[in-house]
Amino acid sequence: MENQDKKTFKEQLQNEMVNLQSKIDEAKLQLHLGTLEAREELQPHINKLEIELDNAKKQMEEFDDATEKAWEDIKRGLDSSFKTMKRSLDKAKKHFQEPHK
């Protein structure tokens, strides 16, 4: 992959990470404002999101120095991490939308 493609992809990933971090922060705020039941249901999703985001940040640190093959592996890993984070975030959002008794 050419340097410009890498640069563009890296910028897209960085924007995505900022976006996901803000959504995680919002979910954490909702967690603290919610009922005990909601907190117990949401905490595992938020924990998973934070772990995935940390993993993505570590992979991004390796991004600039990666060889072509390593870069493709990092790209696949980051794509997978973002998909997992989005699924976890969607699951967490469902808890915010459901009325708790």
Image (tube, rainbow, N blue to C red):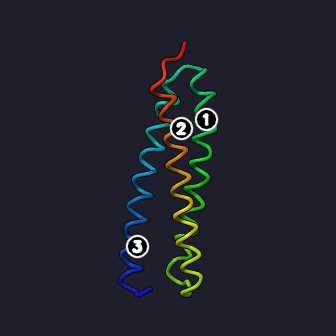
Q: What element carries label 3?
A: helix
| Amino acid type at mark 1 | Gln
Question: In terms of image quadrants, where is residue 9?
Answer: bottom left
| The C terminus - image quarter | top right
Question: In terms of image quadrants, where is residue 43?
Answer: top right
How far, Cα to Cα, is label 2 from label 1?
11 Å
- Residue under label 2, please give it: 91
Up-down relation of residue 64 to residue 28 (above or below)? below
**Label drawn at residue 9:** 3
Q: Which residue is drawn at 47% across and 28% down?
A: 96
Q: What element carries label 2?
A: helix
Q: Position of residue 82 (x, y in %)?
A: 51, 57
- Residue under label 1, please give it: 43
| Amino acid type at mark 3 | Phe
Q: Position of residue 79 (x, y in %)?
A: 52, 64
Question: In terms of image quadrants, where is residue 7?
Answer: bottom left
Q: Nearer the viewer, mark 3 or mark 1?
A: 3
Q: Position of residue 64 (x, y in %)?
A: 49, 81
| Amino acid type at mark 2 | Lys
Q: What element carries label 1?
A: helix
Up-down relation of residue 45 to residue 56 (above or below)? above
How crowded pointer 3 is (Cα within 10 Å; few <14, some 14-19, many 20+) is rated as few
